[in-house]
Image: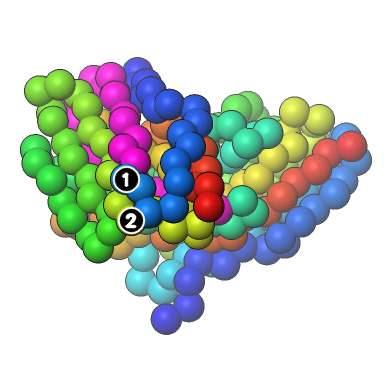
Amino acid sequence: GQSLEQPSEVTAVEGAIVQINCTYQTSGFYGLSWYQQHDGGAPTFLSYNGLDGLEETGRFSSFLSRSDSYGYLLLQELQMKDSASYFCAVRDNYGQNFVFGPGTRLSVLP
Amino acid sequence: EAGVTQFPSHSVIEKGQTVTLRCDPISGHDNLYWYRRVMGKEIKFLLHFVKESKQDESGMPNNRFLAERTGGTYSTLKVQPAELEDSGVYFCASSQEGGRDAEKLFFGSGTQLSVL
């Protein structure tokens, strides 16, 4: 089976940098993705890491270390609108379903 | 380009009744997934279609849940009879087939199901 762990809550102030970690256990591994979900909204795709290293998309970056079964999402220059839940998701093999982590609720304070 | 659409957005039914949820994926997306989020907890996988075929339905909780995707276009998820524990938000997601595009799920806004 698969399992993922994330911190349940993170709080930071506007303009700060925050890192949300994700550790996973899978029988195989195809890639790690990150999604953002605002209250009452749909999850939206943020990033995907198939290989080790850092992927950067604007203020958001995602990192993967396959040897450590670990990844993180880095949010820079935090804005109030970044307050949301963030989910990591893994797929153990191509063609299989995505398994989501429990989610991290980020609160950005003024 | 139209996104993933789900209908209805909300449904309130009584225990024992039947409810059918519908999902229209993005045109051309072969992969279609159903997920459920209960009480603000994790997003749990229900099943995965590739075109009209069920690729994986290991997440379906029991035989009260039936999903179809006739013709490989829209999908329906029927709950019959509904129980209290079926309450939650049901999300549909779709993705393209093949390569890096298959890793990006596009979610619908979900159906909030309340079973009373």
**Front position in the image: A83 or A101:** A83
Residue drawn at x 13%, y 30% is A65
Q: Amino acid at mark 1?
A: Ile
Quarter containing the N terminus of chain A: top left
| Residue topped by disc 2 | A77
Coordinates of residue B10 in the picture (x, y in percent): 76, 56
Coordinates of residue B95 in the picture (x, y in percent): 35, 59
Q: Are marks 1 and 2 in contact (CB under 8 Å)?
A: yes
Asked whether A22 falls inside the magenta stretch, the response is yes
Neighbourhood count class around disc 1 (C-alpha, 10 Å): few under 14, some 14–19, many 20 upward? some
Residue drawn at x 53%, y 47% is A109
Query: Please, is residue B68 above or below residue A26 in the view?
Result: below
Neighbourhood count class around disc 2 (C-alpha, 10 Å): few under 14, some 14–19, many 20 upward? few
Residue drawn at x 35%, y 71% is B28
Query: Please, is residue B73 above or below residue B48 in the view?
Result: below
Q: Which mark is residue A17?
A: 1
User: Going by the image, does A84 lie left or right of A78?
Assistant: right
Q: Amino acid at mark 2?
A: Glu
Residue drawn at x 50%, y 66% is B4
User: Going by the image, does A40 lie left or right of B35?
Assistant: right
Coordinates of residue B99 in the picture (x, y in percent): 16, 56
**Front position in the image: A8 or B87:** A8
Coordinates of residue A62 in the picture (x, y in percent): 23, 45
SS for callout 1: loop
In the rendered structure, which segment of residues is drawn in magenta? A18-38
Residue B18, by quadrant, is: top right
